[in-house]
Amino acid sequence: MNKRDLLNFRDLSRDEMVRIFALATGLKRKQRQEIPHPLLARKCLAMIFEKPSLRTRVTFEAGMVQLGGHAVFLGPNEVQLGVREAPADCARSLSRWVDLITVRTFSQAILEEMAAYASVPVINALTDLSHPCQVLADCLTLIEHKGDLKGLKVAFIGDGNNMVHSWMEAAEKLPISFAVACPRGYEPNRQIEEQARKNGARITVTDSVEEAVTGADAVYTDVWASMGQEEETAERVKAFRDYQVNEKVVAMAKKDAVVMHCLPAHRGQEITHEVLEGSQSIAFDQAENRLHVQKAVMVWLLRSFKDLDDDPWITT
Ligand code: CP
Ligand code: NVA
């Protein structure tokens, strides 16, 4: 079997996404019932993080331990991709020792170089361009709250950033529509948008919050200045001031809409404290599901679904 990676949603078929959600649901049940599920016993995960993280780092590490394996954290001062060592050399060295690599870095090109040279699977733990693990967890959370993804409208308010790109790519494969409202000059990557539309994604890009949120089943937001853009914060706070998810904006969505945030959140900027803490917010369910969905992704990458099909214990 050729090795597989998860660099963006091009690496997953619609069927594989559905199966990952099912596997994650089974693993979540086992975890909650304290039933051991050592599907990756003795496997080792190397985690390269060139940007800060709470959720991604902890969920990969805890997830690997719960699956019977081990994780090695490599922070920004250790590997220094492209500074201390070429990504290709790092990938080839790690491949001789570990079974799986996850990378959080700035450039998607560095991640792709790592994957091209690694002989073990590589997972995108966030780049400037995309964050597929977060969107997988978000979709699992929507399935839990809405029963099904079919026909859902997800409205994103804020910056046309990595989260938006991954949602657009996911919309190619999932039966949802996706609308993003962002100020002029902060629209998502045009190439990703066009590619997604060409592949059948139902996408709206607008500068009107009302247009995006009307009829939405989920109202999603993220920070106005992503990691690496800290110096632009003051300028962005001005540019995004009409793009805050507050009670007025939530009221424009469907009555039973959920409010989503990938976290970390900046209360008073992209979202109000009241909305983040309100009854419609499912932000901490999203955070919880990072654990379960990434466990499913790691199992999918290291074991075939066929292998798992022979073992129905896993999803029940
Ligand atoms: N949502 C998310 O990826 O969180 P961290 O940056 O804390 O990992
Ligand atoms: N857009 C944010 C996502 C954090 C999970 C960032 O890249 O910092």
Image (cartoon, rainbow, N blue to C red):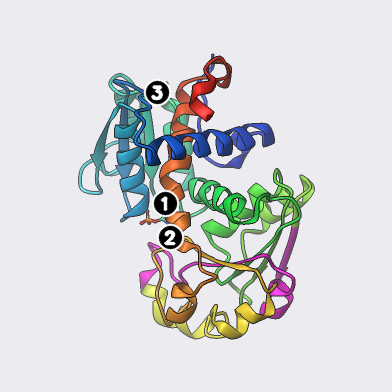
Which residue in the rendered view is the most extreme toward the left?
77
Picture residue at 42% right of the left edge, 79% below the top: 273
Element on which disc 3 rests: loop
Location of mark 1 (residue) = 288
Q: CA distance from mark 2 to mark 3?
A: 26 Å
Image location (x, y in percent) of residue 95: 34, 23
Disc sitting over residue 39 in the figure: 3
Instruction: Work out whether 77 lies above or below 213.
Output: above
Verify CB contact (< 8 Å) between mark 1 and mark 2.
yes
Q: Quadrant of residue 33?
A: top left
Location of mark 2 (residue) = 284
Q: What is the three-letter code of the residue carrying label 3?
A: Leu
Mark 3 Cα-neighbour bin, 10 Å: few <14, some 14–19, many ≥20: many
The segment highlighted magenta reads: 203-230
Left or right of 48, for residue 316? right
Mark 1 Cα-neighbour bin, 10 Å: few <14, some 14–19, many ≥20: some
Picture residue at 73% right of the left edge, 74% below the top: 214
